[in-house]
Image (spheres, rainbow, N blue to C red):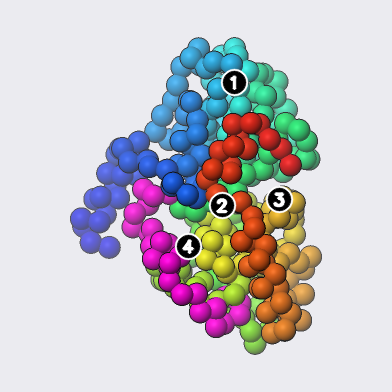
Amino acid sequence: MNTITKFSKWILFERYPNFYRPPHKKYISYDTYRSFADHIYDESKTFNPNNVKKGDIVFLNGRFIDNYLKTQNLKIRNSYSLIICGTGFVIDEMYSKLLLEKNITHIFSNNLTVERNDLFTFIPFGIKDKRHIFSSNFKRYLNSINSNKKFILNMDESLVQNQNAILLEKKPVLENKLINYQSPKNYKNFYEMIRDHKFLLFSNEINYDFNIIWESIMLNCYPILKLNTFTKALSKIGTPCIFVDEFKEIEDFDEKFLLNMHNKLKIDSSKTNLLKRNYWKSVIENNLTF
């Protein structure tokens, strides 16, 4: 990475994080959810709690939930909806009780571990934001021909941020000749790899939401995920993936099974709205649950 690129990234992400935050017009992402809100509390913005009107939408970066609970949430007097999005956090039973002590009518979050109820809705994290221009090659690969010649891409964790929070215990090496073990050099290389594979398998068990799950689905390369508290939430909303109870099950996957599953998931994916901006905008504005 040259000096100009490093300086540009520092300007965009460190010095002036609110300078360039355009939402995607078609897909969901962190900044897309952010654009739905009347008030924002994150790494670049805050707001006056007295300005929150009845029925407003507040956006919260999940990493700042503790500060939010001590400051903003205590002072908001009117009922409102809350979007909690990002990485490196989880909304569990403890946080759900603290949040609902005040005037929140509905909570939308991409990292929910609470039991399903009418006050919480799981939302997908979506793809990388437009402002991450140095890794936003997805349009090129979205419009290119997907060869899908190979079956399973086993990707290491090199592109995963907040690894300790997102990834659980490393899985054993699996014996299946259809698994292709690779390590992408960068995001561009990652997109090239998943366009050439039918399924994506991570080196570890996934604990929380992150972009690569949704970017691979967008490019018709479907994740293979071990079921746990988080991935069960993905399953409940119909995320097109193969879900397994144990990684060892993957050793028995053959070409016929994988071809049938890929065709099925491709059809399911074409019918779903999970990545569509307008769909989630409607869900949030109308406080819908599933």
Label 1 packing within 10 angstroms: few (<14), some (14-19), many (20+): some
Q: Using the rendered image of the protein, determine whether residue 66 is visible from the camera's viewpoint.
A: no
Residue at x 76%, y 66% (from the top left corner): 244
Q: Residues within 10 Å of mark 4 (few under 14, many from 20)?
A: some
Q: Secondary structure at mark 4?
A: loop
Whether 139 is among the magenta residues is: yes
Q: Residues within 10 Å of mark 2 (few under 14, many from 20)?
A: many
Quick one: quadrant of the C terminus? top right
Structural crowding at the residue carrying mark 3, measured as other residues with C-alpha within 10 Å and reported as few (<14), some (14–19) or many (≥20): some
Residue 24: give x, y in percent of width and height: 43, 47
Residue toward you, 106 or 41: 106
Which amino acid lies under the numbered mark 3 shown in the image of this protein? Answer: Ile
Q: Nearer the viewer, mark 4 or mark 3?
A: 3
Q: Nearer the viewer, residue 211 or 259?
A: 259
Q: From the image, which quarter does the N terminus lie in?
A: bottom left
Residue hosting label 3: 237
At label 4, the amino acid type is: Leu
Give the labeled residue for mark 4. 159
Q: Amino acid at mark 1?
A: Gly
**Pointer 1 or 4: first along the chain:** 1
C-alpha separation, residue under disc 4 versus residue under disc 2: 21 Å
Which region shows up in magenta? 129-153
Q: Of the two numbered discs 4 and 2 on the same chain, state the one appearing first in sequence.
A: 4
Give the alpha-carbon distance from disc 1 to disc 3, as whole Å. 25 Å
Image position of 129 (left or right of 289): left
Q: Are marks 1 and 3 in contact (CB under 8 Å)?
A: no
Mark found first going from the N terminus, 1 or 2: 1
Residue at 36% x, 48% y is 131
Occupied quadrant, residue 75 = top right
